[in-house]
Amino acid sequence: MASLTQTVNRAATYAEPGTLKICIQELPIPRPAAGEILVRLAFSGVCHTDYAFCMNKFRGIPATPKGQIGGHEGVGEVVAVGDGVRTVAVGSHVGIKYTAAACLNCENCLVGGESSCTSTATFKLSGYMTPGTFQQYCITSAQYATPIPASLDLAAAAPLMCGGVSVYAGLKRSGLQLGDWVVVSGAGGGLGHLAIQYARALGARVLAIDAGAKEAFCRELGADTFVDYRALDSDERLAEHIHRLTEGGAKVALICAASSKAYGQAPSWLRFRGCVVALGIPDASVSQAISIFQVVSLELRLIATAGVKTGSRLEVKECLDIAARGLVKTKLQLRKLDELETVFHEMHAGQVAGRVVLDLQ
C-alpha cells in the first residue's frame, strides 16, 4: 500500500501559458477535504488537449492560469480520504478524468453530459482551472473518481481516462453496427490507435488514414486497410479511393486528428446516413467547411464527443471493461515527469505514435 512517506509533491506546471515552457516544482502534499480523496498518482497520460491548454490554443475560453498543473489522464492509489467518504477505500486504484467533478443532477449530467455540467459550484476540469494529474499527489472527488479493474495494468489504463473513453463514446453514440466500416482519421496517434481497437472490439471493419510511415503500426493494431493521405493528390481522389475500399463508403468517420481539412473531407467518405464523429479539435477555426449539400443529400449526422469533452461515468466503465478483457491494448511510451516539455515539442512536430505516459513513481 502506498503511504505518505514523501514530504513533497513533485509537479509539472505551465510556466508561461502560450509557450511550451514547463517548470518542475516541489509543492506541499495536499490534504483532502470532506467528500474528497488524495490519490498517489503512478502514471498520467499526455493528451493533445494538455498541449493545447499549455499553448492557449482553444479560442473563446479564458487563458490557462500561469503555474497551472496540467494533465487529466491520471491513475494511482488512494492514500487518504476526507470526512464523509464511504464509497472509496484507502488502497484502492482509481482514475482521474478530464471531468474531475460534476454535480450529476443538472439536465446535462442526467443525460450523460457530465463534461458539460452546468453547476458552477461543483463542475471541475482537471488540468485547466483545477490542478491536474502531472503531479505525484492529486486531490479529486470521491464521488467522481473512476475505479480501475484489478486486471488492468495501471500504465495502460491512464490513456483510457480520456483518449479511450472519447473514442469509445464516439463509436457507441454513432449507432455503429456489426460489420460497418469505420474510417479513422489520424489513426496512428494517441486517439486513433485506440479508436482502431475499440472499433474492432465493437465488430466494425476499420480503414485507417494517416501518413504512410504509420501503416505497419495501424495494421498491427487491427486496421483492415490503410490509406496514406499524402499519396493522393486531391480530396476527390481520396474519397473515390475510400469508397472503393469500403464498397460504397464508410458508415462512420471518426476524426481523431486535430485537422480542419479532415472535417471538410469527411462527408465525402460516407455512405447514406453515415455519421461524422468529432473528436480532434483543430487549433484554428475550421477553414474547410463541411458541405451542407452532402449532409442533406446523404442524410448524414454529425456528433461530438470531442477531444476535451469525454464520456460519462458509465461509458468510462464500459471502455475499461473492454480493455480489461484484453481487447484493447494501449501502445505507450513511458517517460519521466521532467520530460514533459520535450514531449510537448514532439507532439507539436507530429512525432508521437500511440500515447506518451508519464511515470510519476
Image: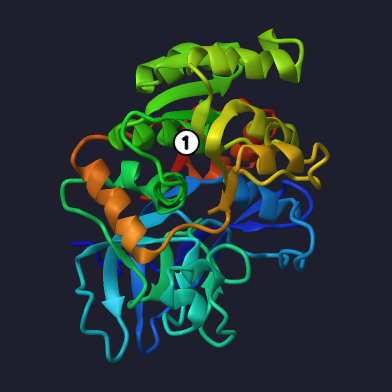
Q: Please state, as top left, top right, bottom left or bottom right, where the N terminus lies in the image.
A: bottom left
Q: How many marks?
A: 1
In this rendering, position of residue 317 left or right of residue 244:
left
Taking depth in this image into account, of 55 and 197 the one nearest to the observer is 197
Looking at the image, residue 14 lies above or below residue 198: below
Looking at the image, residue 3 lies above or below residue 45: below
- The type of residue carrying mark 1 is Arg
Give the image location of residue 96, x and y in percent.
40, 62
Local crowd size for mark 1, using a 10 Å CA cut-off: few (<14), some (14–19), many (≥20): many
In which quarter of the view is residue 343 placed?
top right
Q: Secondary structure at mark 1?
A: strand
Give the image location of residue 234, x and y in percent.
76, 15
Looking at the image, residue 4 lies above or below residue 190: below
Q: Which residue is mark 1?
A: 355
Taking depth in this image into account, of 344 and 211 the one nearest to the observer is 211
Looking at the image, residue 323 lies above or below residue 161: above
Can residue 290 be seen in this snapshot? no
Residue at x 33%, y 28% (from the top left corner): 179
Way the structure is coloured: rainbow
Give the image location of residue 102, x and y in percent.
46, 77
Residue at x 67%, y 38% (from the top left corner): 297
In this rendering, position of residue 84 left or right of residue 307:
left
In this rendering, position of residue 335 left or right of residue 345:
left
Residue at x 53%, y 65% (from the top left corner): 126
Can residue 152 be seen in this snapshot? yes
